[in-house]
Image: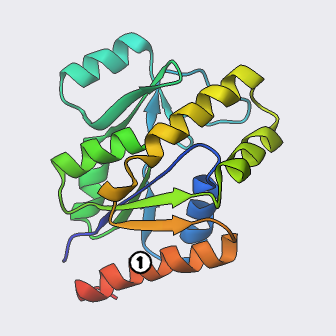
Amino acid sequence: MPKGSLIVISGPSGAGKGTLVDRLVARVPRLWVSVSATTRKPRPGEMEGEDYFFLSAEEFERRVGEGDFLEWAVVHGNSYGTLASTVRDRLEAGVDVILEIDPQGAIQVKNLMPEAVLVFIVAPSMEELERRIRSRGAETDEQIKTRLATAVRELQLVETYDHVVENDDVARATDELVGIIESLRNSEGRS
């Protein structure tokens, strides 16, 4: 059985990564979205093992020290990471794996697994990115400023990616992502 492909989807906060990944999974069979581990507290309605693996800071640090993470980073004061064993098990089973992670983590994954395909999601403009972040109503002005400053830094990494998808229209951007995965499968003879 051929191995699955590892597709890393990242980009700035507010670019619409989560929406696109949800639509992608609904349209493409045999995709698995990796569940990240985090030290942040669960938000209302989030489920352990479904939304995140919620770890204490001590447990997270111990697992980093043991090399359990494919990538990890501190983002806005909390640690996030992808457990290597869960990803590798799925890939070995022939399942394509989606990682929805920040650009810092994407670069770590590419260094460890050069076969990973990196896809950067961008909003049409910084103004639109700010509008999207503000429309969520979940952050203070200071948090929004931090997210926008982070976005400027993250956009500098765009040239290290294999694909860039502009999320100017959700349906069109989803079609583009579907096309990327179909071309991967076709090139590997795994339709």
Q: In the depicted view, which residue is nearer to us: 92 or 134? A: 134
Q: In the depicted view, which residue is nearer to us: 5 or 179? A: 179
- Residue 17 seen in the current view: yes
The quarter in which the N terminus is drawn is bottom left
At x 70%, y 20%, the residue is 142
> Looking at the picture, does residue 57 appear above or below residue 151?
above
- Residue 49 seen in the current view: no
> Looking at the picture, does residue 189 appear above or below residue 48?
below
Where residue 65 sits, quadrant-wise, is: top left
Q: In the depicted view, which residue is nearer to us: 142 or 23? A: 142
* Secondary structure of the residue carrying numbered label 1: helix
Instruction: Tell me residue 178's x, y (percent).
Output: 50, 78
Instruction: Tell me residue 177's x, y (percent).
Output: 50, 73
Where residue 80 sits, quadrant-wise, is: top left
At x 26%, y 24%, the residue is 64
Q: Is residue 140 left or right of residue 2?
A: right
- Give the labeled residue for mark 1: 180
Instruction: Tell me residue 27's x, y (percent).
Output: 57, 77
Tell me the kind of residue under disc 1: Ile
At x 37%, y 48%, the residue is 157
The quarter in which the C terminus is drawn is bottom left
